[in-house]
Image (cartoon, rainbow, N blue to C red):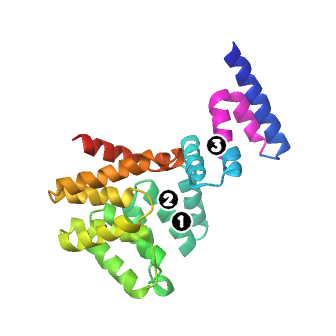
């Protein structure tokens, strides 16, 4: 009984908040018709982003949106692309295709954009390279990233750097991959680069060094806040698992 009362009070409070803050009145129906799920969605999508404009809040918002309407973003991107086949719309659709695991489609869209005045655009080149990586066309990835830096020497992108290291590993260029991973391990924000570095070391039978890096990831997570652990759950959990093997 107390739970029901609390649930009703929460719904009333959220409805009042929706009205007072001028939110879309559709939220009222969502909160009323879906007491628990609707309330959680409203808090995550509308309240938290206002209260804390952090990466964690934005990620939570995006995750809930994807659950409520998993195809909204790609549908919108497809619609815009069909209305106007511009580079901007093509790039947006390519990004959404990548996010949905449609790597061949993403590759084709990026490739179409990389012509004329946009042939050396670093963002398009990186998007193309990461799509091609997922298709295991590693030589093309390396050539693309080498060309990207040649054309845009001032371009700085840690994710592109990590992609390059992983590509070198796949091409069995061990010494070069080691250099790149060691550099990334020293400056990359978050545990992703360190995780792939540790996996690389393990594949090279450097088990003690590998475990030491995995342990660093776990230790960093232990001393970090909830947001950090939520954002990097995949790599933290993966590191813990590796340490038990």
The label number, if any, that marks residue 34 in the structure image: none
Point out the tag, 3 or 2, that comes first from the N-terminus.
3
- Dot 2 lies on which element? helix
Residue 108, image x, y percentages: 40, 69
As displayed, is residue 198 above or below residue 186?
Answer: above
Residue 15 is a magenta residue: no
Q: Nearer the viewer, residue 99 or 56?
A: 56
Q: Quadrant of residue 146?
A: bottom left
Residue 4 at least partly seen: yes
Q: Are marks 2 and 1 in contact (CB under 8 Å)?
A: yes
Residue beneath label 1, please?
92
Residue 207, image x, y percentages: 18, 53
Judge left or right: residue 143 versus residue 85: left
Q: Are marks 3 and 1 in contact (CB under 8 Å)?
A: no
**Which is closer to the viewer, label 3 or label 1?**
3
The residue shown at (52%, 44%) is 226
Residue beneath label 2, please?
96
Judge left or right: residue 61 versus residue 130: right
- In space, the residues marked 2 and 1 are separated at their CA atoms by 6 Å
Q: Magenta segment range?
A: 24-45
Look at the image and tell me in which quarter the C terminus lies: top left
The residue shown at (56%, 72%) is 88
- In space, the residues marked 3 and 1 are separated at their CA atoms by 25 Å
The residue shown at (34%, 77%) is 144
Residue beneath label 3, please?
44
């Amino acid at each position: 009984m107390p739970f029901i009362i609390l649930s009703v009070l929460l719904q009333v409070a959220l409805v009042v908040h929706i009205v007072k803050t001028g939110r879309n009145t559709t939220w009222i129906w969502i909160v009323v018709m879906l007491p628990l799920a609707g309330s959680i969605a409203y808090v995550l999508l509308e309240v938290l982003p206002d209260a804390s404009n952090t990466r964690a809040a934005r990620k939570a918002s995006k995750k809930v949106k994807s659950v409520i309407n998993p195809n909204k973003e790609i549908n919108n991107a497809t619609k815009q692309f069909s209305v106007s086949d511009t580079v901007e719309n093509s790039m947006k659709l390519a990004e959404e295709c990548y996010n949905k695991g449609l790597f061949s489609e993403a590759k084709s869209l990026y490739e179409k954009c990389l012509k004329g005045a946009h042939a050396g655009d670093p963002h398009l080149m990186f998007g193309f390279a990461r799509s091609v990586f997922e298709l295991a066309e590693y030589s093309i990835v390396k050539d693309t990233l080498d060309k990207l830096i040649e054309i845009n020497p001032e371009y700085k992108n840690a994710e592109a750097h990590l992609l390059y290291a992983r590509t070198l590993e796949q091409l069995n260029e061990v010494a070069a991959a080691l250099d790149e991973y060691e550099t990334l391990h020293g400056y990359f924000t978050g545990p992703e680069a360190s995780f792939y570095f540790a996996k690389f070391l393990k594949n090279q039978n450097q088990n003690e060094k590998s475990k030491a890096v995995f342990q660093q990831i776990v230790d960093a997570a232990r001393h970090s806040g909830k947001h950090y652990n939520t954002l990097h759950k995949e790599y933290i959990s993966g590191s813990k698992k590796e340490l038990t093997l």
